[in-house]
Image: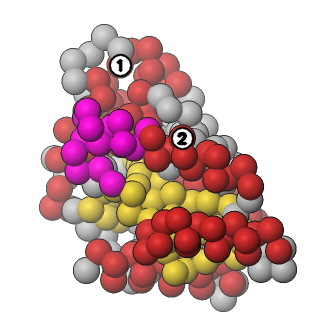
């Protein structure tokens, strides 16, 4: 079982879009996938077609130890993967986790119980560095970083790299950056091409070959409660995410 955080400390970079569509893409290439929503906004839950307001059990219950993943997860109706959902309750978990033992390893322990049931676990992290994000980073083997090719994105990236180094040194020696995924890419914009070249120059093979284009259908899909990959399989964005899923599988060999 490979566990990956989809993380970037900058908001609005397409983390949830990446998490949901990579989950659907990996399911399409035959992998058993669990998507863990660690963001109290619950966007990955809703984007997978699950009503966050009607969750009988959520990631909140799992983190507090009152439920296991096997009973709390649900199938995404159209996505072909399992979801451990989140809702507003999760915002309170921050405070409640503070007093618990091994508070940053709660998710890791819970995932160990379903080790044989999933090939991939994708964790959609909130943009802030919180106890929730730390739980994701402590459970993961690696981090996939979705990035827009814009000037400020490079600044946010250095913060994230420092965070990953600290978690690696102090809490999770397995943690590493798996790769950077260029998202919402528009090749007509010169600056985006320049930033893309800078990324490749600086990070080399850590930059995924697949590029996710700016795509209206990907943006529309969540309002229909499904991933772009299944909402409009022929759209450029959907095709790119399935290609990215294949690249992930190949890269991890």
In the picture as drawn, the residue positioned furthest to the front comes out as 201
Could you tell me which residue is drawn at 27 percent across and 62 percent down?
2
* Camera-side mark, 2 or 1: 2
Query: In this orientation, does residue 103 appear?
Result: yes
Q: Is residue 190 left or right of residue 106?
A: right
Read off the residue under disc 1: 97
Whether the magenta-drawn stretch holds residue 166 is answered as: yes
| Percent position of residue 8, x then y | 55, 48
Which badge, 2 or 1, comes first in the chain's sequence?
1
- The answer to which image quadrant residue 81 occupies is bottom left
Residue 209 drawn above or below residue 200: below
- Give the camera-side residue of 16 and 251: 251
- Give the camera-side residue of 170 and 51: 170
Could you tell me which residue is drawn at 31 percent across and 70 percent down?
32
Total residue callouts: 2
Whether the magenta-drawn stretch holds residue 226 is answered as: no
Residue 103 drawn above or below residue 79: above
The residue carrying pointer 1 sits among few (fewer than 14), some (14 to 19) or many (20 or more) residues within 10 Å by Cα, namely some
Considering the image in quadrants, where does the C terminus appear?
bottom left
Read off the residue under disc 2: 159
């Amino acid at each position: 079982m490979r566990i990956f955080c989809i993380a970037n400390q900058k908001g609005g970079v397409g983390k949830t879009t990446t998490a949901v569509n990579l989950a659907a893409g990996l399911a399409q290439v035959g992998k058993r996938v669990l998507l863990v929503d660690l963001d109290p906004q619950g966007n990955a839950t809703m984007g997978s077609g699950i009503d966050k307001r009607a969750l009988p059990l959520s990631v909140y219950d799992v983190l507090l130890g009152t439920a296991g993943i096997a009973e709390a997860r649900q199938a995404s109706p159209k996505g072909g993967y399992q979801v451990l959902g989140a809702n507003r309750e999760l915002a309170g978990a921050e405070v409640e986790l503070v007093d618990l033992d091994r508070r940053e390893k709660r998710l890791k322990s819970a995932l160990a119980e379903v080790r044989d049931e999933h090939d991939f676990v994708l964790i959609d992290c909130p943009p802030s560095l919180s106890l929730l994000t730390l739980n994701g980073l402590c459970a993961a083997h690696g981090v996939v970083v979705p990035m827009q090719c814009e000037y400020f994105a490079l600044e946010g990236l250095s913060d994230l790299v420092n965070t990953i180094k600290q978690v690696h040194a102090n809490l999770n020696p397995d943690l590493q950056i798996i790769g950077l995924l260029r998202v919402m890419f528009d090749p007509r914009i010169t600056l985006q091409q320049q930033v893309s070249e800078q990324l490749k120059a600086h990070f080399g093979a850590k930059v995924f070959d697949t590029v996710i284009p700016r795509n209206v259908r990907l943006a529309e899909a969540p309002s229909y409660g499904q991933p772009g990959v299944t909402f409009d399989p022929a759209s450029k964005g959907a095709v790119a995410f399935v290609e990215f899923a294949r690249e992930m599988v190949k890269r991890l060999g």
